[in-house]
Every structure is written in C-alpha cells, then in structure tokens.
C-alpha cells in the first residue's frame, strides 16, 4: 500500500493525478485547502492538498483488492463509511471551487442561500466580505447572529425616502408613474386611505389616465369608498386648473396612465402633465416581479420624469425577494414604499432600511 500527498490547483486536478498514479480504488485519507501568497482576503490564490493511499495503477493490484475485501474485519465498515464521507467532502469542495467562490463553511452556506433568494452573486460576495470583517469565527458559526449581521450590513446599503407627511405651507402634489400593470391605481388608494385614517388630513384624488378602459371607474370606486370626489384631467392645462382649485387640500394624489419605457412619445406627453404642477413629487412604481435588466431599463427611461423616489410593488407575487437588494444598490433613487398585496389600505408600508433588508432576506432571516 502506497501513501502519497498530492498538491494541485483544485480538487479535480488532484483527483485526476491520484487516479493516474494509484488507480481507481485509491483511498482519500485527507483533504486540505491552503492559501498561497497575496494579501489577506476572501479570494486569494489557493491550492488543494490531498493525502491518498493505494496499490498503484497496475493490474496486479486487483487480486490484492479482492483478498482484502473478503476479510471479516469490522474495521472495513468504518473505513468504508470514512471513505464515503471523504469523497462527499471532496465533491463538495470541487463544486465550491468550480463556482469561483471559496468561503469559510458558514459563509458558504449563507452565500448559497443568498443566491437562492435571488441576490446577485457579486453583491452577495461583497455583503459576506463585510460581514466577515465584522464577526469573529465563533459568531460566524451561530446562524442567528450571522443572519442578523447580514441584515444589518445590507440595511446600511439601502437608501429610503421618508413617507408622505403634511406640509405646513403648501399642498403636497404627488404623481405616481410607471409601466402598465404595476399597481399605481391601487397604491394611490392605499396612500389616500392611510392619509385619511392615520393623519386625519384632507386629500384630493385626480386621474390623468383617460386611455385605459375602466381606469377612471377603478379609481372612482376607491374614491367613493373613501368618501372623496375624483377629478379627471384630460390635458395639462386642465390639470393645472384642478391643482389651483384644490389648494385647500393637504395632499393631491395624481394617478397617471401606464406607460411603456419604450414609448418615448408617451413619456414626453406625461412629462407635460407633470410640468403643470409646481412644486410636485414623482414616485416611480416598479413591480418586483419585473426581471432585473428590464427594471433597470424602466428606471433609465423614466428618468426623463425626474422621479424623487420608488414604490416597489407586488412583493406578494414573488417568492424570493433578494432582488430588492440589487435594486436598492443599482438604482439611484430612494425607496419610499413597499406594497405587499391587493388589500386597501393595509398592504402597504413605508420603507425603512431594516424593513427592506428584512423583506429581501426573509427566508434567511427566519433562522
């Protein structure tokens, strides 16, 4: 029986060398990964050292294998189990190396879970690098402590906008804009209901969405339930008059037609309506179910309207919410609200850094 240590760039290379030298029946005795050179960090160059034993890749090794296998030695069961565990470890290590990410085992588990939640891989690496700087090895082994730290670090990356509050000097005019089907009209109803019920402030409802069949009727239904009139503006001049006529209100919430990010003419027409109000605020509504490249394109195209903040809608329609972190990190606008269902008024919440992080990591945070 020969025992030999093999040193290679990765587990796959080491395993190939072992098979060539000791044969297919070689026993893996020990696997270690070591760092080589470079500054301290997560992703320095590494090598794998594998200690293996075998008869060698010779035909004469076959009879010896048969003879040993027939010995009634109880230690063979233990050896077989140990060999199985070592091979599993080797396979796991090979898989981890193949991803290009090699982390301490607790962070590797967290990394895998972050990917399952929909967090961008590069963002997950940065997040865990910051967490590793913050926690010692013992704290990393405790899942509750680890995920609290992940949420805390993630929250530090999230920019939010305070919820709507009354102005002491003027009416707050707020436009909701965004693509078709993201939930602008329902969000308007939720905001109006919360203003009426929680702040006890006067609110007016205006819609400029005269294109979509049933759009006015939908908001009219909400307005009647709230006991408020609904006003319709067919052009920017009419909108300007309505705003001037309702300066007694604390808020004017303005619904707008859904607009494709690819339709420049409609976006420019919508900009004329927004220009009719001064001062005003613009909240861009994005559905979390929108794939990331499309969401980023929507934000880029809607920048013509100079949005002041975001409403991230339809969290209830998405199983994994990790893309919230990617949106918060890549989009240069703060998050104002999250909507979590269709119920009016309860399924909306003002965004906070910890609240957004908790939604993004809710599966991992449950630990």
Image (cartoon, rainbow, N blue to C red):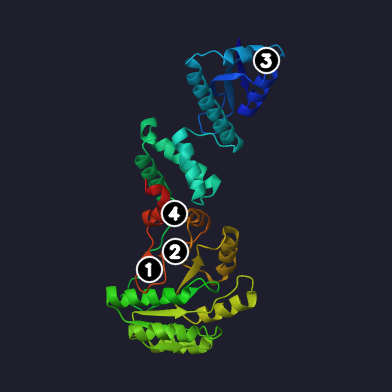
Residue 219 position, x and y percent, is 44, 83
Q: Where is 355 relative to 67, above or below?
A: below
Residue 316 bears which disc, if any? 2
Of the image marks 2 and 4, the number of the one nearer the N terminus: 2
Q: Which residue is mark 1?
A: 347
Q: CA distance from mark 3 to mark 1?
A: 69 Å
Camera-near label (4 vs 3) is 3
Give the number of the mark in front: 3 or 1.
3
| Furthest-top residue in this view | 1
* Element on which disc 1 rests: loop
Q: Nearer the viewer, mark 2 or mark 3?
A: 3
Q: Determine the CA span between mark 4 and mark 3.
A: 56 Å
**Left of 30 or right of it: where is 242?**
left
- Residue nearest the viewer, comparing 190 with 25: 25
User: Which residue, given by chain and number where applicable, does mark 3 sit on?
Assistant: 62
In space, the residues marked 1 and 4 are separated at their CA atoms by 17 Å
- Can residue 367 be seen at all in this image of the molecule? yes
Could you tell me which residue is drawn at 67 percent across and 15 percent down? 62
């Amino acid at each position: 029986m020969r025992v030999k240590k093999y040193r290679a760039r990765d587990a796959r290379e080491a395993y190939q060398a072992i098979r060539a030298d000791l044969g297919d029946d070689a026993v893996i005795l020990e696997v270690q990964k070591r760092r080589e050179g470079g500054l301290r960090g997560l992703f320095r160059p590494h090598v794998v050292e594998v200690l293996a034993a075998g008869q060698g890749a010779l035909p004469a090794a076959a009879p010896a294998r048969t003879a040993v296998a027939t010995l009634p030695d109880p230690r063979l069961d233990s050896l077989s189990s140990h060999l199985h565990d070592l091979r599993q470890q080797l396979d796991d290590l090979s898989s981890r190396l193949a991803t290009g990410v090699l982390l301490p085992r607790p962070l590797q588990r967290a990394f895998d879970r972050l990917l399952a939640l929909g967090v961008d891989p590069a963002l997950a690496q940065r997040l865990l690098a910051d967490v590793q700087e913050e926690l010692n090895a013992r704290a990393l082994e405790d899942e509750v402590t680890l995920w609290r730290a992940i949420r805390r670090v993630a929250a530090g990356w999230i920019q939010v906008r305070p919820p709507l509050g009354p102005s002491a000097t003027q009416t707050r005019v707020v436009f909701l804009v965004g693509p078709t089907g993201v939930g602008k009209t329902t969000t308007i109803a939720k905001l109006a209901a919360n203003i009426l019920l929680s702040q006890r402030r006067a609110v007016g409802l205006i819609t400029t969405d005269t294109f979509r069949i049933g759009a006015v009727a939908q908001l009219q239904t909400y307005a009647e339930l709230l006991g408020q009139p609904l006003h319709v503006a067919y052009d920017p001049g009419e909108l300007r008059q309505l705003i001037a006529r309702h300066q007694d209100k604390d808020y004017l919430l303005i619904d707008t037609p859904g607009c494709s990010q690819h339709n420049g003419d409609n976006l420019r027409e919508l900009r004329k309506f927004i220009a009719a109000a001064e001062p005003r605020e613009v909240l861009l509504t994005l559905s979390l179910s929108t794939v990331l490249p499309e969401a980023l394109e929507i934000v880029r195209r809607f920048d013509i309207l100079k949005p002041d903040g975001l409403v991230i809608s339809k969290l209830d329609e998405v199983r994994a919410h990790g893309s919230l972190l990617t949106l918060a990190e890549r989009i240069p606008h703060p998050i104002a609200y999250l909507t979590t269902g269709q119920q009016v008024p309860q399924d909306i919440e003002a965004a906070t850094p910890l609240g957004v992080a908790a939604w993004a990591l809710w599966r991992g945070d449950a630990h």
